[in-house]
Image (tube, coloured by chain):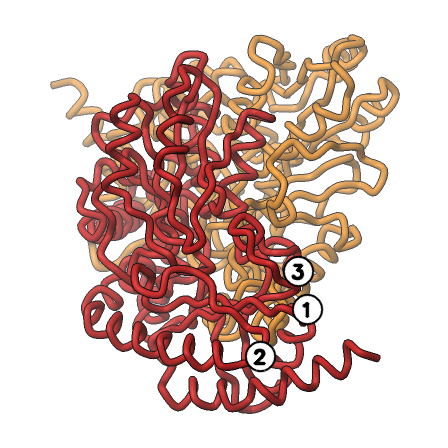
Chain colours: A red, B orange
């Protein structure tokens, strides 16, 4: 790897700050014991875990009793969908937006094979509200899943309207907030919410589920699991997650504005390149994410070439599975594209980094074009 | 808590050494990225994860391709049982020893409700081989689960004979080695094995499954999960787990002898107390574990009083769930007991600690006796 590296793949993962790393270490020193036991060391671990839960609950604006920790986002998705479907008495259909995260759609398909309805989005990525209304009005719908904001293109959904439609139909709404918490204000309109600490700068290894007190669910897993996580979650990681979120929230408004401007600069720079389209809503969007679609170039050589130039970016499906599947998000939006690049900023990224990146792109595109023509 | 504390509850959890804590920190510095992506940071994280898997596989004496990481022991149990039962074409019965860990029995009951056979053990905790042979010969048995060594009483099972019986019946044997790896040599006779890094001194948050190449299993979870863990496991924790195991294995023979002697001292000291019986095989046992049954006293006040005296011990079920359920292990062995204490030594425990503990016990017993008579 080149000595100087610029990490522009901060969606779902982000470099861990020294304050967060210190919290992890403190969590290990004081929270290594099993919070489920009764001796002094265990009580101390439990207090740290409860404190972490409270801090995260406060940002999500729910009571900590309604926040559950699991080991990861896909695991959180499996537990929340399984337990909410179980409470819906025989209803099994799951309605999702066409641009949900693969991890969530995979879980939905696993739980209700062949019974998952994907609702179209418009060319900016906003859910088709009429189609959504028609879908949730079917009497066999158990639950609907819509993201707060998209993890590739950044488009923020209009959850007030979406939640109202679901509520009218009596269908509980699961909101995937895994791309937005810590970047913008937490959403207000949902019956269940999934959040991803690794996305806001925590070490990976924790998934968060929040439920409204009135949201119905049935335990659909073996007895004896601690809360929603078999074997319990890592106390040090939970503590680090709470501290990382605190760190993000403290400067959120200013940082969101700064990143919004940087992504604006990036979007206009990219759109000046031939055959490149920037996807998603330019206004109602997350501050830190951007996806560009390339008409003639594949994603894999672009990512590899940029990696050799010292820039880490993403491509294809952003969910962490097989990295060069075509993006299901772009496919759902009807974007005609060979490849795409996904950029995610973290607080350490500067205007100079963006300008260096934009200055590098023509050279990278040219190199990839030549290599593809051979 | 008293300033001086002695942690004698080291089963399933153990204080983390500074070398292991440093490995966690190094794993965070170099392994924070998502190992499933393709940029330089992710390749580095993947290399750390692969290295951790190789180091653990070597101790288990299997190829690293056959070692899978999950988030915890109960989760490992659910995945391995679910996927092995799925491969057994309609057979659904699960045979377990009567003293298996609650977490495993809960998973078995969840997967095959009412179809779990518990096989008796003798008064030292050894499996009744004739009863086991009869149980696995039933044609609807999918899989058998027997522990390498018991997590409360320490008795080591005769896995060579047990595995031969299961193999004769064509039934795959899952061995729960969660109490033994890092304390004694890894077992040789199994078709699938479950191990617990937190038990050998790693930070909690990882479960290990090893399979023989010929062991059959079918994926019984959503597509897109990384290996056996939805969302993947924590790279820093995996690295810390490998380092902690290395640390244990380096000095294992000498440390096992030392702990075996300390537990011998503890056993004879406890057996001199009135109404106290030490349970399990005094010879074929783990070096570091001991459970004492109290004829007239409850476990909870004993644990609380010892906690106030600065000693952390366990009681009841050792699996980390509701802490003062009666011990299912002791119940299965027919031990007539009100309460019990479980002691687990870690490498930091000295002969002086044991002697202080034994000197404290008469005072603790007297205080609990008085408080119970009021």
Q: Which residue is mark 2?
A: A274
Going from N to C along the chain, the mark reached first, 2 or 3, is: 2
Left or right of A117? Residue B116 is right
| Residue under the point 62% across and 62% down | A337
Please rate how many residues cluster around mark 1, counting C-alpha atoms within 10 Å: few if below 14, some from 14 to 19, many from 20: many
Snapshot quadrant of residue B179: top right
Residue placed farthest to the right in the image?
B168
Is residue B265 in sight in this rendering? Answer: no
In the displayed structure image, the side of residue A227 where residue A324 appears, left or right: right
Measuring from the top left, give residue A140's x and y in whole percent.
Answer: 44, 16
Tell me: residue A201, above or below residue A255: above
Q: Which residue is mark 3?
A: A324
Residue A38 is left or right of residue B184, and the answer is: left
Is residue A255 at least partly visible in the picture?
yes
Judge if badges 1 and 3 mark residues of a common chain.
Answer: yes
The answer to which of B85 and B320 lies nearer the viewer is B85
Q: Chain of mark 2?
A: A
Disc 3 on helix, strand or loop? Answer: loop
Query: Image quadrant of residue B254?
Result: bottom right
Q: Position of residue B348 (x, y in %)?
A: 45, 60
Measured from the top left, where is residue A187 in percent x and y?
24, 48
Which mark, by number, is residue A298?
Answer: 1
Q: How many marks?
A: 3
Front residue of A8 and A302: A302
Label 1 SS: loop
Chain ID for label 3? A
């Amino acid at each position: 790897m080149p000595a100087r590296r610029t990490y522009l793949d901060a969606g779902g993962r982000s470099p861990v700050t020294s304050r967060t790393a210190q919290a992890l270490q403190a969590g290990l020193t004081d929270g290594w014991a099993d919070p489920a036991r009764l001796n002094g060391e265990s009580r101390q671990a439990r207090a740290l875990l409860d404190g972490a839960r409270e801090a995260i609950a406060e940002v999500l604006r729910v009571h900590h009793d309604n926040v559950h920790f699991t080991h990861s986002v896909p695991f959180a998705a499996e537990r929340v969908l399984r337990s909410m479907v179980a409470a819906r008495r025989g209803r099994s259909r799951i309605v999702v937006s066409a641009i949900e995260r693969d991890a969530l759609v995979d879980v939905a398909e696993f739980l209700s094979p062949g019974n998952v309805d994907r609702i179209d989005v418009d060319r900016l990525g906003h859910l088709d509200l009429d189609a959504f209304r028609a879908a949730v009005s079917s009497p066999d719908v158990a639950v609907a899943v819509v993201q707060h904001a998209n993890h590739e293109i950044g488009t923020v959904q209009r959850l007030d309207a979406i939640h109202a439609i679901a509520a009218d139909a009596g269908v509980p709404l699961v909101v995937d907030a895994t791309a937005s918490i810590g970047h913008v204000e937490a959403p207000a309109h949902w019956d269940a919410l999934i959040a991803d600490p690794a996305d806001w700068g925590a070490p990976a290894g924790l998934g968060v589920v929040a439920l409204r007190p009135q949201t119905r669910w049935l335990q659909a897993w073996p007895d004896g699991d601690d809360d929603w996580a078999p074997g319990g979650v890592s106390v040090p990681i939970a503590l680090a997650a709470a501290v990382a979120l605190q760190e993000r929230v403290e400067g959120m408004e200013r940082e969101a504005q700064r990143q919004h401007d940087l992504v604006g600069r990036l979007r206009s720079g990219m759109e000046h390149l031939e055959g490149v389209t920037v996807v998603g809503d330019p206004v109602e969007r997350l501050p830190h994410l951007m996806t560009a679609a390339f008409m003639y170039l594949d994603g894999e050589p672009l990512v590899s070439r940029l990696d050799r130039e010292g820039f880490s970016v993403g491509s294809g499906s952003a969910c962490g599975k097989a990295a060069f599947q075509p993006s299901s998000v772009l496919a759902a939006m009807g974007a005609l594209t060979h490849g795409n690049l996904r950029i995610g900023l973290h607080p350490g990224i500067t205007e100079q980094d963006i300008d260096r990146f934009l200055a590098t792109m023509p050279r990278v595109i040219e190199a990839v074009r030549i290599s593809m023509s051979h």
